[in-house]
Amino acid sequence: MDLSSLLSPDCTRRAVSGSSKKKVLELIGQLAAPRLSGTTSFDVFESLLNRERLGSTGIGLGVAIPHGRLSSANKPVAILITLAEPIDFDAIDNQPVDIVFALLVPEDEHEQHLQTLAAVAQRLNDKSCTRALREASDDQELFDRFTQDECG
């Protein structure tokens, strides 16, 4: 899967200060909304928050993959953030999270949503990949490391 078709450098942020899950989801909304015509940052935030209410998207190993479907979205958009300090995300392993990959897709693209989530989860379950992401020195390097064929 070509992850650079979903993630763009302007939606990639390294060492962000995020004091809570809610603040991180708000930031994701602010980054994603300009790439989704007809969608506000609040629409994105609400979609992600509603999904989190069903159960945490913290998959363990310091990683969370918040995701949502939006009726107003016209294409899939991804956001990749590393946090300066890990935060509580109610992850399945009870460990704090410092890598957040958010995925937003049009409401009718259910199959693509699941396939993309699976590919991203597989990549972020690779310890050499997450180590490389944590070691990125700037936003562009974070983007480059995540989107290359072999992360890490």
Image (cartoon, rainbow, N blue to C red):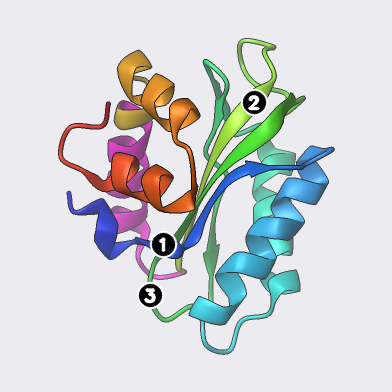
Q: Position of residue 5 (x, y in %)?
A: 26, 64
83 inside magenta stretch = no
Name the amino acid, label 2. Val
Residue bearing the label numbered 3: 75
Q: Which mark is residue 97?
A: 2
Q: Do the residues labelled 1 and 3 touch (CB within 8 Å)?
A: no
Q: Give the range drawn in magenta.
A: 107-122
Dot 3 alpha-carbon crowd within 10 angstroms: few under 14, some 14 to 19, many 20 or more = some
Of circles 3 and 2, the one toward us is 2
110 inside magenta stretch = yes
Vertical placement of residue 89 versus 119, above or below? above
Q: Residue drawn at (33%, 25%), measured in percent from left and top?
A: 129
Q: Where is residue 145 in the image (x, y as percent from the top left)?
A: 31, 40
Residue bearing the label numbered 1: 9
Residue 85 visible in the shown view: yes
Image quadrant in which the C terminus is located: top left
